[in-house]
Amino acid sequence: MIVVLLVLVGIVVVVLLAVVAIYNGLIRLRNQVKNAWAQIDVQLKRRHDLIPNLMETVKGYMVHERETLENVTKARTMATQASGAAQAGQAEGMLSQALGRLFAVAENYPDLKANQNFLALQEELTSTENKIGFARQFYNDQVMRLNNKIQMFPSNIVAGAFNFKQEEFFEIEVQAERAAPQVSF
Amino acid sequence: MLLLLAALGFVIGEAAARGAGVLGLGIAIIVWIVMSLVAYYQGDQIFLAIHGARRITHDDHPQLFNIVEEMQIAAGLPKTPDVYIMNDMALNAFATGRDPNKAAVAVTAGLLQRLNRDQLQGVIAHEFSHIVNRDVLYMSMVGIMVGAIVMISEIFLRGLWYSGGARSRRYSSSSKGGGQVQAIMMVVAIVLAILAPLLAYLIYFAVSRRREYLADSNAALLTRYPEGLASALEVLAGDTHVLVGANKATAPMYIINPLHKPGQMALNLTGTHPPIEERIRILRGIGGNVSYAQYQNSWRQVSGKSAGMLPASALRAATTAQIREPHPQALAAQDARQQFRDAGDLMRKVNQFVFLPCACGLRIKLPPDFKKDRVECPRCHRELSVPVAEAAAASQVAAELPPGLVPDLPTAQPVSKEPPLQITHTGGWMTLRCSCGRTINLAPSCEAHQIDCRNCGRTININYANA
């Protein structure tokens, strides 16, 4: 009788320990996801802060490109108001696209390309975009690990009991526009 | 390696005097511990000092600094490593620091002059991989052991050379049996003292080459763009400069072997780095996605071996990433001359050169130990007064102030009293008329606040306020 009792107690203790370990693992992963998102957020904010400076520099040179400039401003406003990973991803994708077009058009303005301020801003913006890319990869890796834990047995039982939610991936959607280059002879 | 060192210490001690083997062992271990401690705590500083590396900030070279920050995010390092540049025309880079929190990367000025953004990123990623994999610590420990083995062998062999005769006479006069054991020990010690350093070197080189492959594969994964590192290595391979201050012990820290001279056959057994052409071919052989497994496959194809080369732990971490597009700036033809000048100016700035703008538009760079108070412009032959001593410090401050706030620099000439006639043309050109009647044209790039009239020698103040 005592043996059976001891075995039962032993099983309960082992199960409890396992639950604690799984719970702690889930909390650690969730914090890592949060931290990774904070890193992305820092870079996104930096990008949004750089764009008004860029507009100010470019305005004087690109008087005939109103539409391109307005697109960037519009995309920036949308991106600053976006909430949640999915929505932010979409808005940031549009912003990347608008900026890409702006830099492509800038190639036609030799004066602008010689402007030190413009060159510095271009470097900062491309670097920020790279940093977003690298931070995104890190974030998505963490999200995948968390989601796997939440879905897989036996951690899914603990996750369900303590109401852990799956996180969204952060994907920046950029429709690859590859128009054939115009050749004129 | 440690075993080799211990055996060497023991046998040499035993050969010198019977029973002193333990003492020899003790000395070997103490030598090793002292050297390790020095390398552990001071290694990075010593290393940076050998090269005269200067620490730079974001404003000195934004691109390099941004790339380092990008790689820090990609590698998930807690802190941005310090960035140093070395005043050297050779193309090379190295990483140092005992752990990721105290890491530093250094690149040569030559590298900044020759590489585009993607290539620079590849090189920095390679150095970051060394940091993340703790290769710096790993290789310095192995390197110290090699150094200790070589040192002890050298001391023993040289000691034998100079005192061999006297010692053998003394031992033969003591006990006969002991002398025999001693003689055997002596032979073993000599053989070991000759072989041990060779063996140690071979182990060291083999370890070093493996870490290089690992760093290459990791760099490809971090940047998601193997072509960046591959093309950077191509540029580096064609370089003929030799890095000053590099030596055998520190060679594995660099991106390419700093001691390798072009045209010299890369011997497979004694290279700290794999042959550069092979590294390029492996990186270019990665198709589709980047991952450690892909790199290993490519390595197998290039080397024709079927064995594994990367550590199993790296292969287990099955991370894959899609190859990204090249950076648009890397594709655009870059102004090589401008990049060359920028890197040169950066080097002079961190080395406390004084920039003296001449009226003709030339910027004269004066070294910090320039003693004369006047210098002739090499282009227009104007005499310019050099802001000496405390004025040198003032001109440093002046360079950071907006124009108009610059304090007048001391001159030897009397400043002309009458306000000169000054007209600013479109495009920034400026015409001055001196009171002697001579007109002086100033290029838009002129930053000087005073010039000397070449006709009468008066010093004329240039007023930028109404320009």
Image (spheres, grey):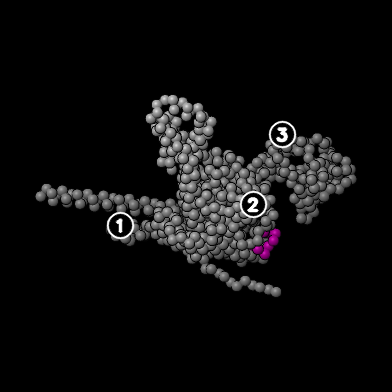
Q: Disc 1 marks which residue?
A: A155
- Crowdedness of circle 3 by 10 Å Cα count: few (<14), some, many (20+)? few
Compared to residue B367, the image places residue B341 above or below, namely: below
Residue in the picture at 50% in, 31% down: B164
Left of B284 or right of it: where is B308? left
Q: Position of residue B346 (x, y in %)?
A: 65, 46
B81 or A123: nearer the viewer? B81
The answer to whether residue B275 is magenta is no
Tag 1 secondary structure: helix
Left of B207 or right of it: where is B93? right
**Which residue sits furthest bottom?**
A185
Q: Nearer the viewer, mark 3 or mark 2?
A: 2
Asked whether the viewer can see residue A132, the reply is no
Residue type of the residue flagged with mark 2:
Thr
Left of B105 or right of it: where is B419? right
Residue in the picture at 47% in, 27% down: B169
Q: Disc 3 marks which residue?
A: B389
Residue type of the residue flagged with mark 1:
Ser
Q: Position of residue A53 (x, y in %)?
A: 61, 55
Tag 2 secondary structure: loop
- Check chain identity for marks 3 and 1: say if they share one: no
Which residue range is magenta in the image? A106-113
Separation of marks 3 and 2 at Cα, in angstroms: 39 Å
Give the mark count: 3
Separation of marks 3 and 1 at Cα, in angstroms: 72 Å
Q: Disc 2 marks which residue?
A: B240
What's the magenta bit mostly, secondary-structure-wise?
Answer: helix
Q: Quadrant of residue A119?
A: bottom right
- Crowdedness of circle 1 by 10 Å Cα count: few (<14), some, many (20+)? many
Q: Position of residue B280 (x, y in %)?
A: 55, 59
Q: Chain of mark 1?
A: A
- Check chain identity for marks 1 and 2: say if they share one: no
